[in-house]
Amino acid sequence: MGLKSDLVTVQELAKAFGVSVATVDHYVDIGLLKITTRQGTQRLFDRRICYERIKMIQELLSKGILLKEIRQQINGAQITPAVKKSIVKKILDKRIIISLILLASVWAILSFLKGRR
């Protein structure tokens, strides 16, 4: 590491990902992000590691995965079959909903076209 540019503050992380400082603090509190070093009262983080982590967290959150489940996955905890089932179900539920919306749209278009004949 050594280079100052490899380190970022909590404010820089929050700004880079469009989240609040409180969100970044929460990720630290629950063990999703680790403070690399401190300079006075300033907490500094490894830029590369945190950027990759936050991208992954945001992607999993967008799929409906809970922070608790993300923490288990990131920290390499033994994921129980129940947690695995929950994660898969959430991903499949979203895919099913999207498929139903697409199907309904196609049905509406076909009905509209059939009515124009």
Image (cartoon, helix red, strand yellow):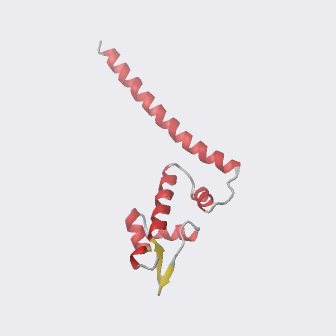
Which quarter of the figure is the C terminus placed in? Answer: top left
Quarter where residue 76 is shown: bottom right
Residue 57 as seen in the image, left or right of residue 18: right
- Give the residue at x 55% y 44%: 91
Could you say where residue 55 lies in the image, as x and y percent from the top left? 46, 58
Q: Which of 32 and 112 lies nearest the eye of the viewer?
A: 32
Q: Which of 48 and 32 lies nearest the eye of the viewer?
A: 48
- Give the residue at x 42% y 74%: 6
Disc count in the image?
0
Quarter where residue 108 is shown: top left
- Above/below status of 26 relative to 66: below
Could you say where residue 43 lies in the image, as x and y percent from the top left? 48, 79
- Above/below status of 6 relative to 42: above
Q: Residue furthest bottom?
A: 40
Q: Which of 110 and 13 lies nearest the eye of the viewer?
A: 13
- Above/below status of 78 relative to 22: above
- Give the residue at x 38% y 67%: 15
- Give the residue at x 56% y 40%: 92
Could you say where residue 99 lies in the image, as x and y percent from the top left? 48, 33
Could you say where residue 39 lies in the image, as x and y percent from the top left? 46, 85
